[in-house]
Image: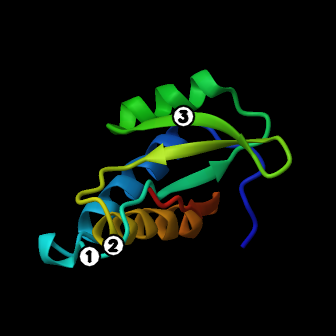
Amino acid sequence: MTALAKIDRETLVHAFREAKAAALAGDPGQDADGGTCNFDTPAIRLPGIREKFVAECAAEAGISASAFDWLGGQRWFFVHVPTHGQANRRSIMAEAACRRLKELGLQAVMYAQAD
């Protein structure tokens, strides 16, 4: 899948709303929270897009996003969608959001970190 070259406010806000909805729809319930505690979350790469713009779009969509440098100093953004639980449940919800971001054409990956 080809990542979007540039992204406008409406498109990014829509993508963030869709990711949030996908995470909530993917919630397997509280009985599915075995495994290792983690900080799993989708991450997106938006070359040339300012951190302030991404944060504003995320806030408009009802979530948050934060920049970090990763993979050789490239700028990425954590997409903080709602997740419940602290282990497998959280991972499943984050993975659902990541899949939706990819479907919408963003360069999205899963950031996985065990506690």
Left-right relation of 38 to 111: left
As measured in the structure, the alpha-carbon distance from the residue carrying label 2 to the one carrying label 1 is 6 Å
Mark 2 closeness class: few <14, some 14–19, many ≥20 residues within 10 Å = many
Q: Quadrant of residue 6?
A: top right
Q: Residue at x 53, y 61 (%)?
A: 101
Q: Amino acid at mark 1?
A: Gly
Q: Is residue 48 above or below residue 19?
A: above
28 is higher (above) or lower (below) than 79:
below
In percent of width and height, residue 80 lies at: 42, 45
| Left or right of 57, for residue 36 | left
**Dots 2 and 1: beta carbons under 8 Å?**
yes
Observer-nearest of 37 and 50: 37
| Label 3 Cα crowd, 10 Å radius (few <14 / some 14-19 / many 20+) | some
Give 90 or 38, whichever is nearer the viewer. Answer: 38
Give the residue at x 41% y 59%.
38
Q: Position of residue 105 (x, y in %)?
A: 63, 62
C-alpha distance separating marks 3 and 1: 27 Å
| Residue hosting label 2 | 88
Give the residue pinned by disc 1: 34
Which mark's residue is nearer the viewer, 2 or 1?
1
Residue beneath label 3, please? 66
Q: Is residue 52 visible?
A: yes
